[in-house]
Image (tube, rainbow, N blue to C red):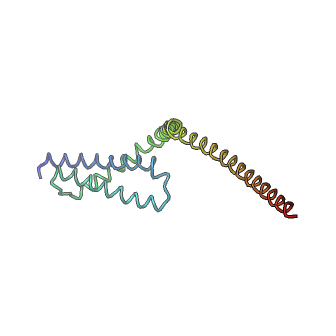
Amino acid sequence: MILKTQFELLLYTFLIGIYIGVTYDLLYYFIFMHLKKPLKIVFDFIFFICQGFIVFRVIYKINYGIIPFYCYIFICLGFLLYYHYANRYYLNYLFPFRKLLYFILDRIIRILNYLFIKPFKDTFYFLRGIYLYLKKKFTGCVKYVKQKIKKHKKAKEEKLIQNKA
């Protein structure tokens, strides 16, 4: 392996370590933080498998898939350097950004709810109210008609009894 390729490999593995730290923090602060522990373990496993594929793809492009031991050291070094210096930046600036992002998403969801879901809900409740009102009136009418029919039958029976007597 020529020297230029080795320096390129070192630089890329160092940057890959920083990349892994950044993506893990972003994923943690926006998604993993809200998950329960068993799901975190599963998603961590999936995350690192995907990152492993990405790392191998980058190294394959540079060095045809040959990964010397010092590449692992530089990936860890890049990750530790990121974690030591930039993690505080994420703690200080990403949490307010996350609150702003959640606020904006909440507003967008409320607007979409107001534009698309609320009219259907209101129409449904309005039509349901009309249905219940008509059902109540109709059952009241049916009861009234049944009572009238009973009275009319009783009156007929009484007339028949009086005519026989």
Please state which of residues 70 and 141 is positioned toward the viewer in this rendering.
141
Task: Between residue 153 and residue 145, name the one nearer to us.
Answer: 153
Residue 67 occupies quadrant: bottom left
Q: Is residue 155 left or right of residue 20?
A: right
Q: Position of residue 44 (x, y in %)?
A: 39, 57
Using the rendered image of the protein, determine whether residue 164 is visible from the camera's viewpoint. Answer: yes
Q: Which one is in front, 66 or 1?
A: 66
**64 with respect to 14 (left or right):** left
Which one is nearer the viewer's eye here, 47 or 71?
A: 47
Image x and y of residue 57, in percent:
22, 52
Residue 92 visible (yes or no) = no
Which residue occupies 69% across, 48% down? 136
**Furthest-right residue in view?**
165
Single out the residue that lies furthest toward the left: 2
Residue 149 coordinates in the image, percent (x, y): 75, 55
Figure quadrant of the C terminus: bottom right
Could you tell whether 122 is left or right of 39 in the image? right
Disc count in the image? 0
> Residue lying farthest front?
164
Identify the residue at horizontal 75%, vertical 50% (top origin). 144
